[in-house]
Image (tube, rainbow, N blue to C red):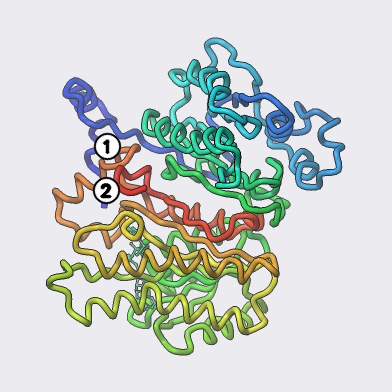
Amino acid sequence: MTDTYLNLVNSGVTQKIAKQLGLPQPAPLRRHRPGTPLVAGPVLVLGRGADADALAAVLSGPAGGDPGVAARDDAALHDAVLDGWDLDVHRHPVPDTRYGAVVLVLTGLTHPDQLAGPVLAAAGVLRGLARGGRVVTVSREATADDAPALAAVRQGVDGLLRSLAKELRGGATGNGVVLREGVPPTAPSALGALRFFLSARSAFVDGQLLTVASDAGSLPASWETPLDGRVAVVTGAARGIGRSIAETLARDGATVVAVDVPAAGEQLAAVANAVRGTALQLDVTAEDAGQRILAHALQRHGRLDAVVHNAGITRDKLLANMTPDRWESVLAVNIASQLRINEALLTSGDFTEEPRIVSLASTSGLAGNRGQTNYAASKGGVVGMVRATAPLLVPFGGTANAVAPGFIETEMTARIPAVTRQVARRLNSLQQGGLPVDVAEAVAFLASPAAGGVVGETLRVCGQNLVGR
Ligand code: NAD
């Protein structure tokens, strides 16, 4: 499961050869380690107006923040400023500065003509962006109710960001926070998403725009342990991505219930022990899976706050050769079980304190993949399910969202034939496969209190796969 090519092009003589031959040069990605700086250098906040000023104040924290802004009657901003992100923030490019991040605040634009100023100001510093640097746009959602010029500039940011992300090198990424009309840039989820995209937690998230629909949610007392006091269930936790999700949620402060099939009992127990959680041996396709998950969480931990539907299988075959067994088993594990478990939780009356549902989708479910009609139907199903489940949770501050991984280095992808695997790894803007922890970080963000305003979304963790939307 190691990417030998990535190691070779980043060391010694093979690095030189790869450069001369013009071969892909994937860069090692900066990943989160508790206690390390949020970004790799100073942050340039570009854009004019109150939104840019407010964000610059939050990012620079109490030391550099404008006390006038902090004193405003805006609880989220007040908390954020008190907490202090304490970054070195510039409002204009300073020559010869190696920026760790550029934040482009484009919320006030009303016509595409106005893009040139902030965008070209950003262009001037991109060459000097630090390795693992970040570009984050903050913009407003385009709707059919907008004046045509307004809709054009807002939708234009989408195309701009996705193209820019494809141009960045050295492990740098570009992502966007899209605010629905009326949502302030300092809403908890706007700040939560901005922080996630700036941080090393989003190492393999690239070219993505995440919509913040409301000012629901709250900022954590500590950004290092945002899941303190929360109890989370992770299905398929014995290995791979599920194991990493269990570890990451526990690192972020959650108590974890690790679920997997009895056949994986030994590995499951090891994961549960490692994260100081509990293990529940359960086939998620069981009729009473939801009831058993809830009963276990309540009996052992007194509450249930989050469910991560990670258990999943593939049974690939061209549709022309598909067997009923292959079709039905994939649909049963990957989507029917999730629907049934959610139904049980939502009708129980015990899943009502800002609950979180996070489901594993897949880029195959968005873009399609040869040989995976069954899998893609199930994963496309997940995207539709979270969109329709989210409104049911909003009344009690809950959310349902999905994470769609692209190529991730796991036992599932290790089974892909070697040449196909090599090609699949390079087919994204970061020119490498992601690690399970990259998916886990996105899940942890969506499970956190700060993501309360992100509802029904599917966030891709795919290094900006060249296929699909
Ligand atoms: P994996 O095969 O390594 O692990 C899946 C785990 O789920 C296993 O521990 C397995 O025992 C468990 N599981 C399977 N059926 C179960 C059932 N009926 N009840 C309970 N547990 C069950 O897979 P992975 O690569 O870690 O993938 C995890 C999730 O991410 C899956 O939903 C997968 O579809 C999705 N995903 C993975 C990739 C990738 O590149 N690896 C890409 C896109 C999406």
Q: For the residue with label 1, is its CB less than 8 Å from the closest atom of ligand 1?
A: no
Q: Secondary structure at mark 2?
A: loop
Q: Residue 106 occupies which quadrant of the picture?
A: top right
Task: Where is residue 248? Give x, y as percent.
Answer: 51, 57
Which residue is at 19% across, 63% downward?
371
Instruction: Inspect the image, locate mark 1, and give the three-letter code of the amino acid beneath it.
Output: Asn
Q: Is residue 195 visible?
A: no
Task: Where is residue 168? Give x, y as percent.
Answer: 40, 29
Task: Where is residue 208? Give x, y as percent.
Answer: 46, 44
First in sequence: mark 2 or mark 1?
A: 2
Which residue is at 38% across, 55% downward?
405
- Figure quadrant, ligand 1: bottom left
Query: Closer to the camera, 129 or 3?
Result: 129
Instruction: Inspect the image, locate mark 2, and give the three-letter code of the amino acid beneath it.
Output: Thr
The number of callouts visible is 2
CB under 8 Å between discs 2 and 1: yes
Q: Say above or below: 175 vs 312.
A: above
Reading the image, the residue beneath label 1 is 7
Q: Which mark is residue 193?
A: none
Q: For the residue with label 2, is its CB less than 8 Å from the closest atom of ligand 1?
A: no
Reading the image, the residue beneath label 2 is 2
Q: Residue furthest top?
A: 95
Few, some or many residues within 10 Å of mark 1 (<14, 14–19, 20+): some
Q: Is residue 51 visible?
A: yes
Q: Say above or below: 306 vs 74.
A: below
Task: Where is residue 382? Give x, y as percent.
Answer: 43, 67
Which residue is at 53% across, 30% downward?
40
Query: Closer to the camera, 320 or 133?
Result: 320
Q: Say above or below: 241 vs 7.
A: below
Spatial CA distance of label 2 from label 1 is 9 Å
Few, some or many residues within 10 Å of mark 2 (<14, 14–19, 20+): few
- Left or right of 32: which side holds 399? right
